[in-house]
Image (cartoon, rainbow, N blue to C red):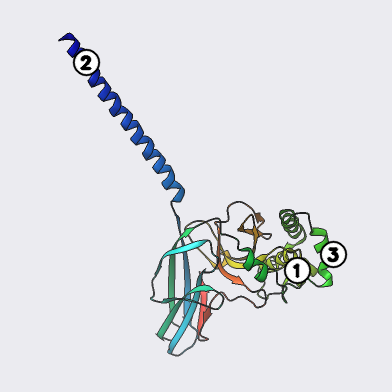
Amino acid sequence: MRAAKVIANFLIFFALLMQQSCDVSKNTEQEKKGVTEEVFVEELRTITFRYKITNNTDRIVFNEYIKIPILAQQFSRHSIKRIDANIKGHINSDKAERLTYDIAFERMLPNETKVVTISILYSFQNNEVYNHDIALIDYLEETELMPYKGQSFSKVLSLLKAETQAETISKTYRWVVQNMTYSGYIPQTYGAGYALKYRRGDCTEYMYLLAALLRGNGIPTRLVSGYVYSQNSIVSASDYHSWVEVGITEQWQVVDAQKQHIGGDDSMYIPISYLDGKSSEKRYESSHNLTVAMF
């Protein structure tokens, strides 16, 4: 009897030990699963645009429209999850590869103002892949606004050329930061030639000069306009900005001499348009009877 009791107690102890082992194993698997899930969780953010749309005439107008660029659709680091707006519209894409929210106003009273609010829920990814084949074709081009093959650029380009692309980017960024003075907003677009000669301008001239000096030394560079804003914010006209992005370490990365940003977290930069370097950008398009103001 005593031997049987010892055996029974041993079997109970063994069963408890196995159960504890299974629980530990289960918890470990859950912890592993939790870590894996955290790695792939999407980072969701919200950006909100607000516009005042006014009939600028003293008469009733019909069939007016506005096209509001909301996010760039090509090469972008974000994916739209949902768009909410207080006025019904349609999402379209334009020739500049922008997504636009298009609204048609069938009838507006004299001097009537309508407020448009558009909120976009999107997921963000901080590592957009750099496509070498596309970049070499499209992002080394000389244009009227970036005439880097001109004689006035040759000396500076030679000065900024380094042994590696990374060193050239760093030297060029520092040179523009040290040699340019921010003028505040300028309505006209003057380009890299003006910026190099007068060493001043707004974010657009900073963008064109930096891009010209990088492209002139063989570094694929794209021109971007959009918004720089904190997470989950209502953006204003003052948040609108222009910058460049370079293809390095297999990713597109922001290089912004005017705001002195290079490397690190680019999540505050939201591309709206990728520019061709030939024509002036448009923040929106509307019929001529409408006045549009962001607020």
Residue beneath label 3, please? Answer: 155
Which image quadrant for residue 109?
bottom left
The vertical placement of 222 against 288, above or below, is: above
Q: Position of residue 29 (x, y in %)?
A: 37, 38
> Quick one: label 2, few (<14), some, or many (20+) residues within 10 Å?
few
Q: Position of residue 215 (x, y in %)?
A: 72, 66
Residue 108: tell me if it is visible: no
The vertical placement of 201 against 108, above or below, is: above
Residue 34: tell me if it is visible: yes
> Quick one: label 1, few (<14), some, or many (20+) residues within 10 Å?
many
Q: Position of residue 34 (x, y in %)?
A: 40, 43
Q: Nearer the viewer, residue 177 or 98?
A: 98
Q: Which mark is residue 7?
A: 2
Q: Which mark is residue 222?
A: none
Label 2: which secondary element: helix
Label 3: which secondary element: helix
> What is the three-letter code of the residue carrying label 2?
Ile
Label 1: which secondary element: helix
Q: CA distance from mark 2 to mark 1?
A: 91 Å
| Mark nearer the N terminus (2 vs 1) | 2
Which image quadrant for residue 168?
bottom right
Q: CA distance from mark 1 to mark 3?
A: 15 Å
Q: Nearer the viewer, residue 37 or 126?
A: 37
Q: CA distance from mark 2 to mark 3?
A: 92 Å
Q: Residue furthest left?
A: 1
Residue beneath label 1, please? Answer: 195
Q: How many marks overall?
A: 3
Q: Position of residue 88 (x, y in %)?
A: 38, 76
